[in-house]
Image (spheres, rainbow, N blue to C red):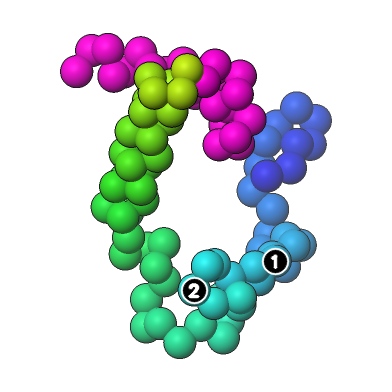
Amino acid sequence: MSEEDGVVCDRIPDYCDYRDDGCDLCPSCLRCPLPKCRHDVQAEGKRTARLLRDREILRQRKVHGKTVTELAQSYGLSKRTIQRIIRRSSHE
């Protein structure tokens, strides 16, 4: 997206910089052997991974007494995200 005269518009694909970073299964999307992208078919997998991550964050806080700041740094998340995870767990 680019901003011209305060208006946000889509760039023409020819002018976009596409990086072929691949994923954890293949270093290049263009050379990937999978018939369908794992990110397209694994939305449920992402949800499960996030739930497992959240449980581990809560366990680290309870068992090891880690602070919000420590958890945010070790998981590469913002302090606000950690706070949301903690708040959500108290409502369950």
Tag 2: Cα neighbours inside 10 Å, few (<14), some, or many (≥20)? few
Q: Is residue 75 left or right of residue 60?
A: right
> Which of the 4 quarters of the picture holds residue 20?
bottom right
Q: Position of residue 63 (x, y in %)?
A: 39, 23
Q: Is residue 57 left or right of residue 47?
A: right
Work out whether residue 52 or residue 38 is closer to the camera in this orientation and state it: 52
Q: Position of residue 92 (x, y in %)?
A: 19, 18
Q: Position of residue 17 (x, y in %)?
A: 75, 62
Q: Which residue is mark 2?
A: 25
Q: Which residue is mark 1?
A: 19
Q: Nearer the viewer, mark 2 or mark 1?
A: 2
Tag 2, which secondary structure?
loop
The magenta stretch is 66-92
Residue located farthest toward the right when viewing the structure as drawn: 5
Residue at image location 31% in from the left, 55% down from the top: 45
Q: Is residue 89 above or below residue 23?
A: above
Work out whether residue 18 or residue 84 is closer to the camera in this orientation and state it: 84
